[in-house]
């Protein structure tokens, strides 16, 4: 019997080749709408080395956005702010047999603490699930650490 790798097992060049047009586009400029936001960040490993050729999917109640990381591990996405003030995130990358799942909160931390999923997270790790503002209206920064110190919280699904 011959085994053929699945898409999840061929992530590296599979995403790089298949999503080249997406990764070459300039990030969408935020519209004047108060609901349009920009999220910038870096995906890195335990040594804080950037992870190129990964893919992040942002899932909101009525919003979906898919963005690759660049050679320096950075990503930029400009979705509409979800009413729930958070996105469910799937991260696909080489070395993973299936994507990892996390959540990104954009609002005030105190207001979000009533969210049932945050009650599952130790208080000292909650910060990894919140984006910081970069000083500009509707602009956020969220860095993802795949493992090690300050590892982003990931959930089973």
Image (spheres, helix red, strand yellow):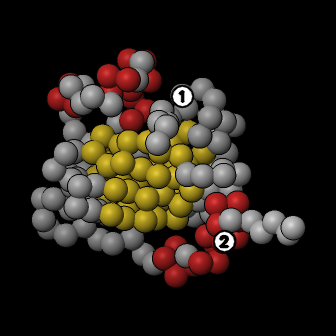
Badge 1 marks a residue whose secondary structure is loop
122 lies above or below 58 = above
Q: Position of residue 140 (x, y in %)?
A: 32, 48
Q: Which residue shows up at 38% across the image and 23% down it?
A: 120
Q: Which residue is mark 1?
A: 150
Q: Residue at the far right: name it.
A: 1
Q: Which residue is mark 2?
A: 14
Report if residue 109 is visible in the image.
no
Q: Residue at the far top: name it.
A: 123
Q: In terms of depth relative to the viewer, which is nearer, 156 or 36?
A: 156
* In the displayed structure image, the side of residue 149 where residue 6 appears, left or right: right
Please report contact status of discs 1 and 2: CB closer than 8 Å, yes or no. Answer: no
Q: In terms of depth relative to the viewer, which is nearer, 104 or 11?
A: 11
The Cα atoms of the two marked residues, 1 and 2, are separated by 29 Å
144 lies above or below 92 = above
Quadrant in which the N terminus is drawn: bottom right
99 lies above or below 143 = below
Badge 2 marks a residue whose secondary structure is helix
* In the displayed structure image, the side of residue 144 where residue 119 appears, left or right: left
Q: Position of residue 73 (x, y in %)?
A: 58, 55
């Amino acid at each position: 019997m011959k085994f053929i790798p699945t898409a999840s097992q061929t992530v590296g060049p599979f995403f790089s080749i298949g999503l080249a047009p997406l990764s070459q586009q300039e990030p969408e400029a935020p519209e004047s709408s108060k609901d349009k936001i920009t999220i910038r960040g870096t995906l890195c490993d335990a040594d804080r080395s950037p992870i190129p050729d990964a893919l992040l999917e942002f899932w909101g109640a009525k919003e979906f956005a898919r963005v690759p990381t660049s050679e320096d591990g950075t990503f930029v996405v400009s979705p509409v702010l979800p009413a729930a003030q958070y996105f469910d995130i799937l991260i696909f990358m080489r070395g993973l047999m299936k994507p990892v799942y996390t959540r990104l909160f954009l609002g005030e931390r105190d207001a979000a603490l009533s969210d049932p999923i945050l009650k599952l997270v130790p208080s000292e790790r909650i910060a990894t699930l919140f984006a910081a503002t970069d000083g500009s209206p509707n602009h956020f920064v969220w860095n993802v650490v795949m493992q090690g110190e300050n590892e982003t919280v990931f959930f089973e699904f």
